[in-house]
Each structure stands twice: as C-alpha cells, then as structure tokens.
Image (cartoon, rainbow, N blue to C red):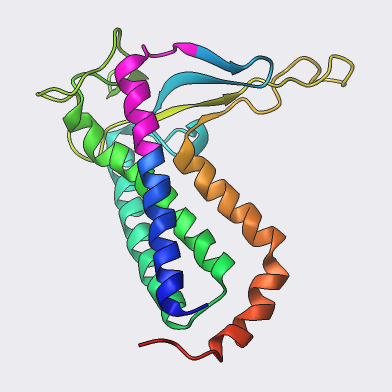
Amino acid sequence: MTMNKKAIIAIAVILGILIADQILKIYIKTNFELGQSVTLIKGFGELHFVENYGMAFGMAFSGTTGKILLSIFRLIAIGGLTYYLVRLLKKNENTIFIVCISMVIAGATGNLIDSAFYGVLFDTGSVYDPTISDVVGYSGVSQFGSPGYAKPLVGCVVDMLHFTTRWPEWVPKVGGREIFRAVFNIADSSITISVFLMIIFYKRIFAQAKKEQTEPIEK
C-alpha cells in the first residue's frame, strides 16, 4: 500500500474517532444531568454521565495547576505523536501500526478538546474547589453559553460509557462486584484498543516493516 493511501487512512481514523467522540460527548453534556444513567444493554452496559477532572478512566489529577499541566502534557504528546506518524508515513510503515498511532492521537486529542474548550463553551460544569481540595458538581443540564464555567485548559472531560457486568456471586472476595467500575469515553477506548491491537499484531507489524520500507513510495 502506498504512502498516500496510508495517509488517507490515518486521517480518516483520526477524524472518524474525533467526530464520534465529540458528538457523543456533546449529546450527553447537553441532554443528561450529572450522574444520570440510561441502560443500553441490561446487565452489560449503560450511559452514565460523569465529568472527569483528571486523566483517562476517571483517574484524578490534583488541583487546577495539575490540570493545566496535564492539558499541556497532552498537547505536547499529541504534537510528538503527530510528528512520529508523519515519519511512519514517509517510511511507508505497516498499515496496522499507522492505524494504532492514529487512534492514540485521536484519543488524546478528543480528551484535550474537552479540557481546553468545554469550560469556555458550556455554561455549567464540574469545577475544582481549592477550599475543600475536591471537585464540585452542578445541577441541571448544561447548554452552550457565555460565560463558561471554567478557563481554557481546566475544563472537565465528559465520560459516559460504563460496563455494568458483575462477577458471579460464587467468585471469592469479588463476587457480585462490577468487573470494570471505571466510566470512560470513546477517546479513552481508542487509546486502549490501539494498545491491544499493537500487542495482538506485534509480530505482523514489525515483521512486515522492513518489507514495506523497500516498496516504492509515490511522490
């Protein structure tokens, strides 16, 4: 496969994930109250609206300064990964590897958009209160409006995907508990799936790399 075709695939993957991620987030943000849930598949999964002030899968990151540093780190990481992707394309690297890197870029960018712009775009959202060293939620449904609820780079990431499957009751210690308690989004999923794909296709990715590098690249 030529570099041009691989570049189109990479762009399509990034844009496709970003668009799907943002459409779902905006829908949830403007139609759900914080903490509201809707069952998708009984006993398996639901939409459960939470706002994440920190990292992926609900992992916290302390304070406003920490939040800004996290957003800046995401921005730097996206820049570095994009540069790396361009190099992979120029070298005509394995298509699966290019797709995986594109998925990571899309996932990181999706969550950065929330942090960078949602605080400015939406009238309400969860904010960090330094007096109690914790994030404070809000009531009602958010709408696009000015002024926003936070400054750029400190907005909350919107999460909504939640697996509700539980361990069988007979399993020692964890019986009856949720197997995966975290609430996440499409961007988080994109990064996670890309890692699994790289593990699954590890041999294929690097076994074909040298072969594909010898193929002529269209100019």
Pick the quarter of the image with the C terminus: bottom left
Residue at x 47% of width, y 83% of height: 91
Camera-nearest residue between 202 and 215: 215
Is residue 133 visible to the viewer in this orientation of the structure? Answer: no
Q: In the image, is residue 201 above or below residue 158?
A: below
Disc count in the image? 0
Report whether 44 appears left or right of 171: left
Q: In the image, is residue 40 above or below residue 190?
A: above
Camera-nearest residue between 65 and 138: 138
Counting from the top left corner in percent of width and height, residue 56 is at 48, 39
Q: Looking at this rendering, what residue extends furthest in the top direction?
A: 139
Residue at x 48% of width, y 54% of height: 103
Counting from the top left corner in percent of width and height, residue 198 is at 63, 61
25 drawn magenta: yes
Counting from the top left corner in percent of width and height, residue 98 is at 50, 67
127 drawn magenta: no
Overall secondary structure of the magenta section: helix
User: On the image, which quarter does residue 136 sit in?
Assistant: top left
Find the magenta span and give its range: 21-37
Residue at x 30% of width, y 7% of height: 139
Residue at x 38% of width, y 73% of height: 86
Q: Looking at this rendering, what residue extends furthest in the left direction?
A: 146
Report whether 91 appears left or right of 83: right
User: On the image, which quarter does residue 65 sit in?
Assistant: top left
User: On the image, which quarter does residue 150 sit in?
Assistant: top left
Q: In the image, is residue 98 above or below residue 139?
A: below
